[in-house]
Image (cartoon, rainbow, N blue to C red):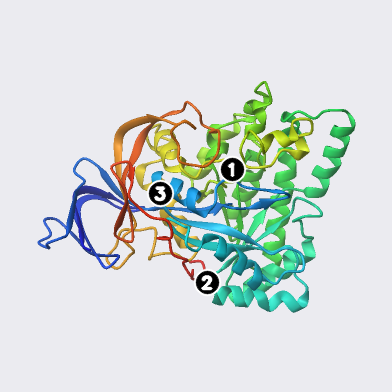
Amino acid sequence: MSVMIRNGRIVTADENYIADIFIAQEKITAIGVGLPYQANRIVDAAGKYVIPGGVDVHTHLDMPLGNISSSDDFETGTRAAAFGGTTTIIDYATQSKGMRMRDALSVWRKKAEGKACVDYGFHMIITELPDDYLNDMDEMIDQGVTSFKLFMAYPGVLMVDDATILKAMKKAAENGGLICMHAEDGNKIEAIVKKTIAQGKTLPIYHALTRPPASEAEAVQRAIDLAKEADVPVYIVHVSSQDALQKIIEARNKKVKIFAETCPQYLFLSIDDLEKPDFEGAKYVLTPPLREKWNQDKLWGGIKNNHLQIVSTDHCPFNFHGQKDLGINDFRKIPNGGPGIENRLHLLFDGGVLKKRININQWVAIISTTPAKLFGLFPKKGTIEVDSDADLVIWDPNKTHTISSRTHHMRVDYSMYEGFKVQGFAETVLLRGEVIINRGEWSGRSGRGRFIKRNKYA
């Protein structure tokens, strides 16, 4: 089926112009003014922006945590992503202790197959790396899983030591993989947590107070030093504080190959939310924790000046009732994570473009183009070019709506942004040329999403 998008203002990371787009066989086949082609379907985008579909490179769908799992699976989570204008995600497959990476990838691919409503790929979380597992990283590259995440936090569960990190980085230097780091000083945090619990301090606010910004900054510096030793690029996930950002800025000024992301929660929420009464603060327990509000302007500055290249969601939802309330008497037992896969583009357009913190091309860059480039999807994804996948969003820059759990499509019983009034709306969304959101209504189908074998980072 062919589609013609007429009269839209095409906005990419670099350009802004009015033209038509002709789509056939899942691809963009022509771009120009007054295209003469006949199409099965015509979409009038006059007065609207046409942007490349969003690329969210940090999600946790159907993620097990003890006896529970994150509340969105690959069907509900990717459908919600589509409503928000995101057409590609990269989720995390986790190598459990004693498991080969190929087996972990198989488990996660089965979670997604037949369910995903948008296209998807995977990073591989490494929890152990004995010498006889090193070639697993090469195998993952061949399978299109070209990035690997290691944790400096969660001792005894996910945390690996510096020797393991360095080993993985050196292997990535050989095979072209990109190392992603969760940077918090897990041992220091563990000591603070034990002392805090011993003092009888168990409320949600102590989740944040036991994970100070300094523990993030120190771990970021350690990751930078290890990456320099291995001579390999490194990507810092979910940067939450000025302390950590400053380490990144200093390294980039010294030409260290370091990239980083932040998330909407660190740009729009603060540690004050953890002090909401009646255990409501548990809704905002995520890691790294929310920081003091003044950090928000520093992070926005980091985005504007390209010290932070990507804004992802770290979407990891747990219901307030029945999941978050497992920690009602002990903040350590509150499942870490929050929902946001549906609201990323809304929040960043309203709070970024309309508030003049970033321009519209930067908006497209951080939500689509740069993640596609860094994680081996470009130019298939993340741009509007002839031969690119026809993943497109008709964006209404004037329509306003109020974010609420009563109307969102994520399978979770609260919104971190409840009551936020935002301007900007994903009116129509196409995935490889098929309209999956039609004027705000679902017209896609489960299983339409396709596993994407990614190239090495660009």
Q: Residue 414: image x %, image y %?
A: 55, 33
In whole angstroms, how far apart are the C-alphas of marks 1 and 3? 17 Å
Quadrant showing the N terminus: bottom left
250 up-or-down from 104: above or below = above
Q: Left or right? Give the position of 93 relative to 372.
A: right
The label on residue 431 is none
Left or right of 79 on screen, residue 252: right
- The number of numbered discs placed on residues in the rendered structure image is 3
Q: What residue is shown at x 74% (from left), y 41% (from top)?
A: 214
Q: Is residue 255 visible in this depiction of the protein?
A: no
Q: Quadrant for residue 29, please give it.
A: bottom left
Q: Give the labeled residue for mark 3.
A: 82
What residue do we see at 62% from left, 50% from top?
248
* Marks 3/2: CA–CA distance: 23 Å
Which residue carries the number 1 mark?
A: 317
Q: Residue at x 59, y 43 (%)?
A: 317
Nearer-N-terminus badge (3/2): 3
Q: Which residue is more in the foreground, 3 or 271?
A: 3
Is residue 149 something that shows in the picture?
yes
